[in-house]
Amino acid sequence: MNAVIAMCTFCEIHGPRVIFTTQTFRTFEEKESNKKLKFYGPKEVMEQSYNFSMSDDARVECDGCRSIGNVKYLSNEHESRTSFLSARQPLTEDIKNLLGHACIRSLSCELHFGKDGICYFGDESRGHVLSHAFTLKDTQARGIRRSCSLIVFMKDKQFLLNMWPFFVDNLKQIIRELQDFAERKYNTDEAENPQRAARLSSASDGSSENRNTSKVIPRSLCEITNEKHVFVRIHMWFVWILSAGARHLVEICPISNDLLESPLTYNYLARDLQSKIGRTTEGSTSAFLISYQDFKESPEFTEISKKKLATSILRNIKSYISKEQFRQLLYSSLTGIQILVRGPADKTLEALYALSSLVPRACRRIKIYNNEYTDINDCNFLGIDSSAAVPVCCSNVCRLDIVSNDHRLASDTKAYVVKWSGVLPNKLPTLVLKFEKYLDNDKLDDVVLKAQFMALQEEWANIAKIVHTMRGNGHRNDLTGLIVSLGAGLHDYSLLDSWSMGLPSNPA
């Protein structure tokens, strides 16, 4: 999996420091496919790691932030020809700098929502980070607690957030075990020499003997947990997460600027895609990644899609109705309100084709031309004969009446009439406003506009998938923090909930 997992600590003397990292390396040399290697990665990495360790300014480090020194832990998965290498610092210079920046943000300026201390931050240039802050009891630390964090660093934001439930559940398990070790050591130290009472006594009598922090050297993680092989344990935890995570979800979107050169490359994924992605997407809903296939035209519109673009039809409809009415159409289509179209057969077909193409194919239930009304349980896009009885104007059905040319010339009426008794929210979903904005832009032709719509649809369908997966994994608490980090807001809930209806009911 294209990720780096690290443990960070806040040294009371030297500030935030990365003390342990695990990276994935893999070889793609087919000529040696049957030969087991000691290390499935570039030979330069092992050589450079020593240089990186020596290049650090070791003179300003203490036991608390030096951790394992120049020791490295290596685990191999020979079947997939993958190596998992752990060290004190990342073994490539560019990742080392980015991870150091992520460490500082994780332990200083980033806000963590709730008791769990979980948050996301990042950008395209510095990578994307999932951070889980926590504390370990330590009788020698300020406040009797040592601040730490576990961070997962990736270049692919969408992949990282799709893996949010998997990462969070496993990071919590690691933290829980580390805190148990630290708790036992803390209780033993307190029984021998209670620090809280000593510090209170020192503060009350004005003694400065115990207040000179420069004389106190922070303890290492081994001392805090009283676990000699704690870093071996952490290495095995991180290895399992990286190995299981690679099977849990498959990356299929190429990265333009691959900073994580050591993990799985996309040349391999391209060769292995046919065998892996088919099996993974069918066997596990967690591998659900929105692609062009999810927005292909429905079979009912095969012929018309060859003649006209949906964006061209939408622009035509928009030119005949008011801005408010067009917003009602967009809002209803995107949030699951039933669209009922009445009028000439050819125009009805065009309108249904254009409006239904705005949502993922899995969210479409279409009936092209019925002789009688069918409720939303059977279809959310319905074409109906003009003579058929339909519900009175209500908030659950948005009706688009198309007036034929003959009737329009005779009565001087509009070509399209929108009837909906619902009320648009004060703040419309982001996607409604973006669609409207791009349709208004005359500089964009229909071909470019179609590509832009597709990109927006894929983005928001993936956001809906992430939220849906979190809820399916039992995360029923407030997901506002996650939704905001994905670029959405409370005003987008109606769209996300509607699009989630087309996803599996019980995601893994």
Image: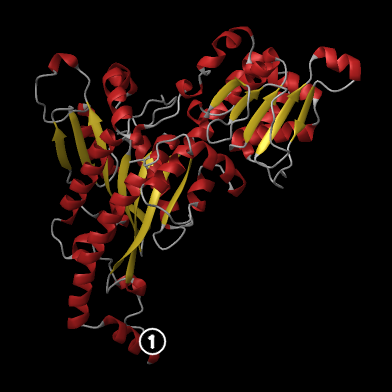
Question: In the picture provided, is 157 more to the left or to the right than 412?
Answer: left
Task: Give the farthest residue toward the left.
Answer: 35
Q: What's the residue type where badge 1 is placed?
A: Ala
**Vertical arrangement, residue 19 with respect to residue 82, above or below:** below
- In the picture, which quadrant includes the C terminus? top left
**Vertical arrangement, residue 126 with respect to residue 110, above or below:** above
> Which of 217 and 6 lies nearest the eye of the viewer?
6
Point out residue 489 in the picture as x, y percentages from the top left corner: 58, 47
Point out residue 2 in the picture as x, y percentages from the top left corner: 32, 33
Picture quadrant where residue 452 is located: top right
Label 1 sits on a secondary structure element that is helix
> Is residue 355 in sight in this rendering?
no
**Which residue position holds label 1?**
203
Label 1, residues with CA under 10 Å away: few <14, some 14-19, many ≥20:
few
Q: Residue at x 33, y 69 (%)?
A: 145
Q: How is the image coloured?
A: secondary structure
**Vertical arrangement, residue 38 with respect to residue 311, above or below:** below
Picture quadrant where residue 5 is located: top left
Point out residue 222 in the picture as x, y percentages from the top left corner: 19, 61
> Is residue 181 in sight in this rendering?
yes
> Which of 493 and 26 lies nearest the eye of the viewer?
493
Q: Residue at x 38, y 45 (%)?
A: 164
Picture quadrant where residue 1 is located: top left
**Vertical arrangement, residue 145 with respect to residue 453, above or below:** below
